[in-house]
Amino acid sequence: MDQILYIDEVINSLKEAGYIVPRPMGLFDPQYWNKSSFDIVARKDVLLMIKIVTNIDVISNELVEDLKLISFFFNGIPLLIGKETRKEPLRDDVVYERRGIPAMNLTTFKKIINNNEIYVISRKGGFYSKVDNEKIRRVRLEQGFSLQDVAVQLGVSRKAVYLFERENQIKAENVEQLERIFKQKFKLPINIFSWEIEKEFNPSVKETDFQAEIKEILADLNFTIDWVKKAPFDAITSNPDEKQLKAEESCLITSLSFSHRMQLYNRLELIREISKVAHKLAMFIIEDGKLPTVDNVLIIQKTILEKMKDIHDLYKLLKKVIRNFISP
């Protein structure tokens, strides 16, 4: 698969559906497509964090951990768009679940962002549909069928039919049979936009001396820092105890000055673009020197950070940052 062409097609589809999408991130860093846990951020009613892959079964632990962690802090939905599993091409009109992340092919993705309903989800054990189980039981009783009557027509056990009426997700083929028997619709659409994401902590990050130093400084200011490996920034900094913060200040996209000068400028542009769509402020920590002022990003020298007495000193500087968020 030509990844860049595939990314262009996804971006065009998002824009046609009314999503705001920043400039392709590979424009700032040609290696971006290979080393980041997400290729596209897009916002409409919700924030989408999209990674393009060929095989949805061949994704690294680092990628999954970072994509889930970043989506968790950004209040976004992570998505994998691909072409195949290890066994077969991805089917149209099916949402696949991989490591807690929804995945699909391009056809299904286009339908979802254009408000077409998808009713089948692939999980371990096969293809399933969400159902209104109370309706199944109510309709069965109204039409005078016993559990055994339905079991005989489906070719399953009486216990299986009993469970159909108590579970909210059953085999897709059984739902089709039930709908045919009762001439009623029981399926419920798969809503990826309300997908619950659990933050994954990445214990495998080995801190450099500079990272350890910054972590200690931020800890003194009551901040928690979560390092990421596969993103254009280095960490997400948060302070769950500060209840009066604006949403964009509840966590900060954080980057450190590891790179050469030109690479720093590229990363700064990337972070600004992500910040605009994610509606999160960013903090770029440098050891010395200066960088150009950009919207949404607090550029701060390590020595200034060290002199801060408490969290409020940092937020005084954050309040001076020009905010420029974009929405549809």
Image: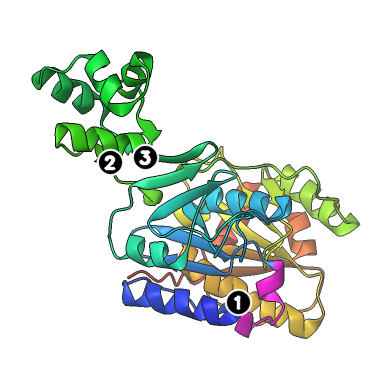
Near-viewer residue (65 or 167): 167
Mark 3 surroundings: few (<14), some (14-19) or many (≥20) residues within 10 A: many
Foreground: disc 3 or disc 2: 3
Tell me the residue that label 1 is attached to: 3
**Image coords of residue 321 (percent x, y):** 53, 69
Please name the residue shown 27% across and 36% down the image: 177
| Looking at the image, residue 68 lies above or below residue 32 | above
- Label 3 sits on residue: 172
**Nearer-N-terminus badge (1/3):** 1
Asked if the residues shown at circle 1 and circle 3 are in contact, with their CB atoms under 8 angstroms apart, the answer is no
**Mark 1 residue type:** Gln
Which amino acid type corresponds to the residue marked 3 in the rendered image? Ala
Q: Viewed as shown, does residue 59 lie left or right of 134?
A: right
Query: Does residue 193 belong to the magenta stretch?
Result: no
Q: How far across and down, in percent of the image, does residue 245 sit?
A: 48, 48
Q: Quadrant of the C terminus?
A: bottom left
Q: Which residues are magenta?
A: 26-35
Task: Judge whether 144 appears above or below 153 on screen.
Answer: above
Question: Is 29 part of what is drawn in magenta?
Answer: yes
